[in-house]
Amino acid sequence: MSASTHLTHVDTTPPPETATTAPATGPRQRLFGSLTIQALLILGVTRLVLAGVSWFTLRVFPTLPLYPEQLPDTFLPKHLWLDGWARWDAAHYVTIALHNYGGAGNLSHNGGLGFFPLYPMLMRWPLQILGIGLTEARLAVVSILLANLCFIVLVPLFAHFVARDFGAETARISVLLLCISPFSFFFSAGYSESLFLLLVILSFVFAERRWWIPAALCSALLTATRLVGLAMPPSLLLLAWRRKSSWRELLSIAILSPLGVVAFFGYTWAKFNDPLAYFHAQANWGGWSDHVWYWFKLFTLHPRETLTSDPRNLIIVLNVALALACLATLPWCWKRLNAGVALFTTLMVVVHLAMTWVSLGRYLLPAIGAYIAVAVLLQRPAWRGWPRDVLIVVSTLLLAMLTILFAHNFWVV
C-alpha cells in the first residue's frame, strides 16, 4: 500500500516470501529448509500412508477374483505390505522379465510384445548381477523397489525444476499435487510410470542446461519405456529450435531421441518378422471404438446407467474429468512454460484423451505442466484457504480409495 496515497496508514506486514526466504539459523533449520528434504518429506508421508492403507485393508478384506483378461498376480501372498503393489500390468512385466518376449511360459498376449522392453530389462539386471535366480516373486519385489527408487529420485528433481522458474512455494505445491493426484499410487506399484516420469524430468533438466545429447539419450530411453515417449523428440526439437541451437544439435536430437522405439520395432522385425508386433499385441485389449466411442455413447445416451450400473464406469468418469481438468491448463502452459514442456504436456493430454479413456488417469501422470499450472492457481487469493484445502482433501481421498481398489484387484487400470 503506497504511503503517497494513504498517508494515514503504514503497512508493516512483512512480504509473503519473508518466511521462506529468511536465512536458516541452525543445522536443523537448514536441513528442513532444503527444498530437496521438503520434497522427500512430502513423498515419504504420502507413500507411508498409502502403504499402510494397502496393508491394512488387505489384512481385513479379501481380494476380488481375477477378471477374465487379468493375468495371475498374487506373487507375494505372505507379504501383504508388498503384495498389493504388484497387480495387473505388473504381471505382464514379470512374465516378460522371466521368460523373455515370446518365450515358453510367457502368459502375456503375443508373448508380451504389447509392452516395451526397458522396464522388464531393468527388473532382471539386479538379480542377474547378484547371481540370484529369477522367480516371479523376486521379480515382483524388484519391480516395486525399482518403481519407488525412480520416484524417490524424480520428486526432488521435479521440485528443483519447478523452483528454478516459479520459486520454492510453487515447487512444494507441485510436488504435493504430484504425490496426491488420484492415480499417483501407480508411482509405487510395479509399473513403468515412475521410470517414465524420471526420464521425462531428466530430459528437460538436461535440455534446460542445453546439454542436448544427454537430453536426447534420456529421450531414447523414454521411447524404450512406452510408445508415448515419442512425445519427447518433437518437444526437445522445439525447445532447441526456440533457443537457436545449431543444425548439428538439432540433427543429433532428431537421430538419437527416438532410438528406443526404433530399436524395439527393429528387434520385433528381426526376431518375429513383424515390425508392428507391438500394435498387433495391443489389439488384444481393443481399439478406439472400445476405448473411446463405447464410453462416449454410454455417457451421452445413458447417463443414469453410467452412474448406477457397472461400477467400473465410475473409473472412466473420473479419468475423463481429470483429462478435462488437464486440458483446461494447456493455454496457461503455453503462456508461462518453456515450449518443450508445453508441447510435451499438450501431447500427453490431447493424444491420450483422443485415443483412449481406459487407463486415462494413469496416462495423464507425466503431464508435468498441469501440476505446475494448478500449483500457481492455488496460490492466488481466490484459491487460498478452503478451496485449496478442499481440492487437496478430495484428491487425497480419491487416491486412498483407488489404492485400496487396486490392491484388491478392482479394475482401476
Image (spheres, rainbow, N blue to C red):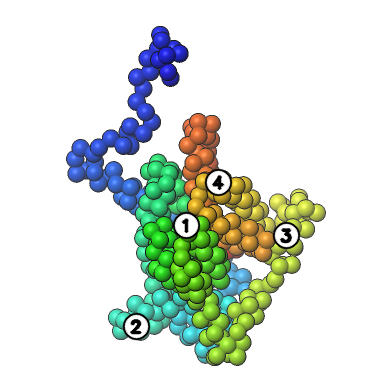
Q: Is residue 62 visible?
A: no
Cβ atoms at labels 1 and 2 below 8 Å apart = no
Return the residue at label 3.
295
Cβ atoms at labels 2 and 3 below 8 Å apart = no
Return the residue at label 2.
128
Between 21 and 278, the one lying in front of the other is: 21
| Identity of the residue drawn at 61% across and 87% down | 274
Q: Counting residues from the N terminus, which is met first, the one under dot 2 or under dot 3? A: 2
Between 359 and 78, the one lying in front of the other is: 359
Label 3 to label 1: alpha-carbon separation: 42 Å
Residue 306 position within the rendered picture, expressed as x and y whole percent measured from the top left: 72, 54
In the image, is residue 248 above or below residue 360?
Answer: below
For the residue carrying disc 2, how many other residues have a C-alpha within 10 Å: few (<14), some (14-19), or many (20+)? few
| Identity of the residue drawn at 48% across and 59% down | 244
Residue 272 position within the rendered picture, expressed as x and y whole percent measured from the top left: 58, 90
Return the residue at label 4.
335
Name the quadrant of the N terminus.
top left
Label 2 to label 3: alpha-carbon separation: 44 Å
Q: Nearer the viewer, mark 4 or mark 3?
A: 4
For the residue carrying disc 1, how many other residues have a C-alpha within 10 Å: few (<14), some (14-19), or many (20+)? few
For the residue carrying disc 4, how many other residues have a C-alpha within 10 Å: few (<14), some (14-19), or many (20+)? few
Return the residue at label 1.
243
| Identity of the residue drawn at 36% across and 60% down | 153
- In the picture, measured across the screen, residue 4 lies left or right of residue 277, that is left
Label 1 to label 2: alpha-carbon separation: 43 Å
Q: Within the image, what quadrant is residue 124 found in?
A: bottom left
Q: Counting residues from the N terminus, which is met first, the one under dot 3 or under dot 1? A: 1
